[in-house]
Amino acid sequence: MSALKFRLPPNDGPVLSVVDMHTGGEPLRIVLSGAPVPSGNTLLEKRRWVRENMDWVRRALMLEPRGHRDMYGALLVPSEEAEAQLGVLFMHNAGYSTMCGHGVIALGRFAVDYGLVAPQGPETPVTIHCPCGIVRAYVTSGKGRVRFHSVPAFTLCTDVSVDVPGCGKVVVDIAYGGAFYAFVSAERFGLDVCSSKTRDLVDAAAAVSEALKAQVKISHPDSEDLAFLYGTIVTDGKDVYSEEPTANICVFADSQVDRSPTGSGVTARIALQYHKGLIQLEQTRTFKSGATNSLFTGKAVKEVVCGDYKAVIVEVSGQAHYTGTASFTLESDDPLKDGFMLK
C-alpha cells in the first residue's frame, strides 16, 4: 500500500495540536495551538480562570480516550513578569498544579529547540514563570539535559502524626518545593519503594494524603493559591547524605503516579534533608524513581527565606526526550469528547 498523505480526519470541533515529551519516563504534553488565551492579570488569576472556564482543554488532552489517568500537560500562557521568557500552567488528572520540575526540564529544552529562546553557547538560560513563581532553567546545548533553580523551598513541619484508616498512626514530614508534599518511608507500610507492587504503594500514599487533607491545615506565606497538599512521596528512608542514589515514588492529584523522581518533590526532599542537617550546601544527591529507575540529581545551592521560614534554593537536574507530535480533534456528537477517567 502506498503511503497515505497525512490529513486531519473530518471534524466539526476544535483541533488541539501538541508536542509530547517525557522526563525520566514522566510525560509532558505541551499544547501548541487550539486552546483559547486565558483571561487574568496574573498567572494565578489565569490558573483560576482556566479551571473555571476552559477545563475542557485539560479533560480532552489529559484523560481518555486521548490521554490516560497519569498523563501530564503544559499550557503556555502570557506572563506578567517582564523577566519571564514563557509562562506555563500545568495540568493533570484532577486539575492544575503550582509547580512541576519534570515539566520545567522538558520545557527548557522545548523552548530552545522551538525557537522561543535563542541558544547561547554551551548552556542557555530559560526563565519560566510557573504558578509558584519564577523558575530559572539552564539548557545544555544539544544534549537535552537541563538543570533548574527552584523557588524558595522549605520545611513546613516534621513528625506530624495522622490517623490513617487501616494503618493507624502514621508520622510524616511536610515540605514545599513549589508544591507541598508529605514524606513517609515505605517501610512504615511493610513495603519497598523499588520492588513492591505499584498499586500497594499508591494505596498507602493516597491514604496518607487523604488523612492529611482532613486533619492538617496547610498555609503558604505568599498566597492561599499555593496552600494545599499536592501529594505524598513514599521513600526508601535513606535521607542521610550518601553518594548512593536514594529512591522514592510520588503519588499526587487523584492517585496519579509520577514515573520520574519528581522534580518539585526532589526540591522539597532536599529542603527537608537540609532542614534536618542531613545534607549541606552544594552536596549533590542522586534521586531514583522507584517506578522507572530514572535519575535526577539535586542540591541546595543557597539559603534564603520565605516568609518566616528558613528556605533554600535547590538545583535539580534531569534529561528530557521527545516522543512525538499530534493533532487531536473533538467531534460535537461524540458523547466522550470531553474525556473520562476510570476509577
Image (cartoon, grey):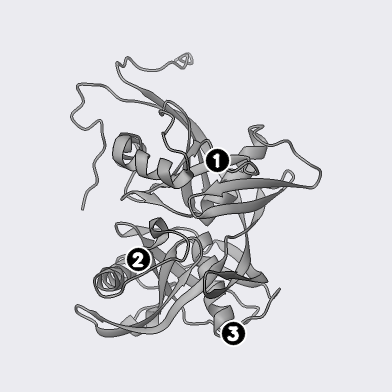
**Which residue: 81% across, 43% down?**
121
Q: Farthest residue to the right: give it.
A: 121
**Between tags 1 and 3, which lies in front?**
1
Identify which residue, 12 or 260, lies in the foreground: 12
Among the two numbered marks 2 and 1 on one chain, the one whose residue lies closer to the N terminus: 1
Q: Which mark is residue 43?
A: none
The residue indicated by pointer 1 is 80
Residue 213 vs 118, above or below: the answer is below
**Which SS class for mark 3?**
loop
Determine the CA span between mark 1 and mark 3.
38 Å
In 3D space, how far apart are the residues under numbered discs 2 and 1 (Cα atoms)? 40 Å
Few, some or many residues within 10 Å of mark 2 (<14, 14–19, 20+): some
Q: Position of residue 41 (x, y in %)?
A: 47, 39
Label 1 amino acid?
A: Glu
| Vertical relation: 127 (above or below) 264 | above
Q: Is residue 74 left or right of residue 60?
A: right
- Residue behind mark 2: 198
Q: Is residue 24 visible?
A: no
Q: Position of residue 120 (x, y in %)?
A: 78, 41
**Which element is circle 2 on?**
helix
- Residue 147 visible in the displayed image: yes
Q: Is residue 99 above or below residue 164?
A: above
- Earlier along the polypeptide chain: callout 1 or callout 3? 1
Total numbered labels: 3
